[in-house]
Amino acid sequence: MEFPEPLLERAFFQGSHDAYVDLRDRAQISPCLALRIESLLTAANTSSLLQEAAAGILGRHSRMMSDSAISFLVCQKGKIIYREWYQSLADDPNPPENVLRAVASTLTLKYDIHVEWPGWRIPADLFKRLIVHELPAGRLLAAKAIATQCPLQQDIIADVVALLKSPDWIVQTIANRSLDQVPDLPPDVLRALSLEAALRILAFQSTLPNNIRDSLVSLVLDGGVVFDSSNLSTFVKHLQTDQNIISIIVTFVSHIRDSHEMENAGKTLCQYTTFAQDIRQKVASRITQGDNQLMPYEAFALSYDIVDLTEETLRLLVTHMEDWDPRMTRAIDRCLERQFTLSSSLLPRLVTYLKHGEPTVRKSALKALKHWRVLAEDVLDILSMIPAETNGEVQVHATIILASQCSLPGRIARTLFSHLKVVSMEKGPTLWRLLGREENLPATALDLMVSLYHHDMLSAQHGFWEFARLIASQECLSDNVVRSIAGLFGVGDPIAWPTILNLLRQRTSFGAILSDLDAEIWAKVFKGFFFCSYGEYPHCYSWQGWLFFYEGDHCFWKVRLETPKHHEKLQRAIQAVQAEWEDIHGTTIGPSLTAIETSR
């Protein structure tokens, strides 16, 4: 609610700061009030504080100001009263043109070197005068002004280009950045750009004239460009269909020596999906043809997301696993992790690394095997021994491969259980996060994983929350796994029970499974349902031989009550919930359970 203007006016003239703030921040003030506030600026007996407050109000309502008031305030530049007016004025995104011109006219003063331009759209004729201003402050004001003009006015683009030749490097920089925002610069403007400015600005152009494209090709092949990933982006964008594109990319990557720049180059090429797979496959294969212009790790970095590398390239990757070069290791790991199929001819070398390799080499070999779902028993034996001998990431990756196998011999399954127990104790969250990337883990492994938490490990310390996310991500769970999850009620930390309930709620088949479970599991599930539900009003009822579990209006499960044994399990579950309720609350549970008994 706004106070009436006459009331605020009276309070303001009596020196009220709150009234000043209200008047300054109002959407508008009346012309009469604006004239009266203007009169304070030059009144002989007005305190400086009141004059400064008046300037602040007028800055916010500059459209109500007379030319004489504007002229007066401009002449006060360097004083507090001007600063108050200017700071309020800066909050207006579009002040009147006469105010803009008045502010710009103050640039004849030498202390305006650091003048600010608060995002106002500058008139074209004023801009053209400022870019040739005799003081650096004028040229800087022009540069800062164009930095806020998106898009640039067409009639000042050529003048912006002129700023690129300014002796003031700040002006040059801001002019460069402003041209970045113009997607279709005229050819004559592009030709006028300096090389450094052109390479960056050309990256933002949607198309280029043929003569400029030809110049770019010559520039690269003659070595007249800085070879980095940002410039590579410009060249690839505009030359991707050029017959020289392979030579251009090879020339770039052969000059890049920084590993992060090389990775950025790979990411740049990933953006061009229409041609990147073919081009980058060829770049990677240049190594196998004995092209000494490329270091191996450079080609691998460029091909790290190709999912069907040639067998020759993959064999070369495996050969270089033992190289003591962290850049090479990182590139190899990225390449191999993305290969969903590998030739069996590569397996002997990978197995050799698993047996005898250093930890880094072992880890690379394990990453190469991560997508293999049916490994021979002798390889599984080697994998099952790795976690017992090593620590850290190697241990985790070996366990993941074992857990991802479609089937396991009994002895290896028993070994996997002991490994899962050890690794989940030490690296549980990491293990479950990595396994959670697979949406169809084998039932054998899932059953082993759930059984871990039957041994009083149901806590955050052992990564239970990450494990729950893994279970939730699985597309299918076998009945045995779902039964095992239900058995987690009553184990370990009760804070985890709502999560268990939520996992079961996501499986509508649980109702049919519950029908065959024993009375003890029924009691646990009932207690979990009634005491751990986050939803509204959990309740059950039976009708025509079926038991329904509801939260609010939503039915999660329905259980067939076919035999006296089912009704006996139901009664024992009800009694367990009632006993628990009385222990906690000292009262008998409400009608949601008695309805089950009476509706039979």
Image (cartoon, helix red, strand yellow):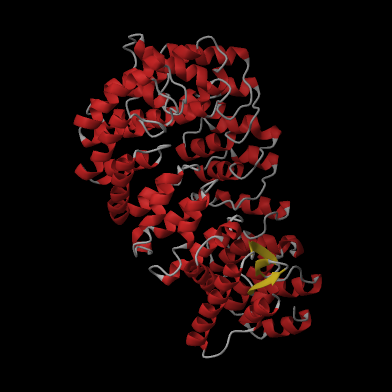
Q: Residue furthest front?
A: 564
Q: Is residue 84 visible?
A: yes
Q: Nearer the viewer, residue 213 or 41?
A: 213
Q: Nearer the viewer, residue 31 or 497?
A: 497
Q: Please indicate whether residue 387 sits to the left or right of residue 300 in the image.
A: left
Is residue 93 depicted above or below 339 in this figure?
A: below
Number of labels in the image equals 0
Residue sitting at 69 percent across and 85 percent down? 11
Is residue 283 depicted above or below 396 in this figure?
A: above
Residue sitting at 32 percent across and 53 percent down? 424
Residue sitting at 38 percent across and 64 percent down? 458
Q: Is residue 43 visible?
A: no
Q: Position of residue 511 (x, y in %)?
A: 60, 60
Is residue 324 depicted above or below 474 in this figure?
A: above
Q: Position of residue 140 (x, y in %)?
A: 53, 43
Q: Please indicate whether residue 226 sits to the left or right of residue 35 in the image.
A: left
Residue sitting at 80 percent across and 70 percent down? 31
Q: Position of residue 525 (x, y in %)?
A: 52, 68
Q: Position of residue 33 (x, y in %)?
A: 77, 74
Tell me where residue 224 sits by quadrant: top left
Is residue 157 depicted above or below 246 in this figure?
A: below
- Image quadrant in which the N terminus is located: bottom right
Q: Residue furthest bottom?
A: 586
- Image quadrant in which the C terminus is located: bottom right
Q: Nearer the viewer, residue 72 or 335?
A: 335
Q: Please indicate whether residue 525 sits to the left or right of residue 551 in the image.
A: left
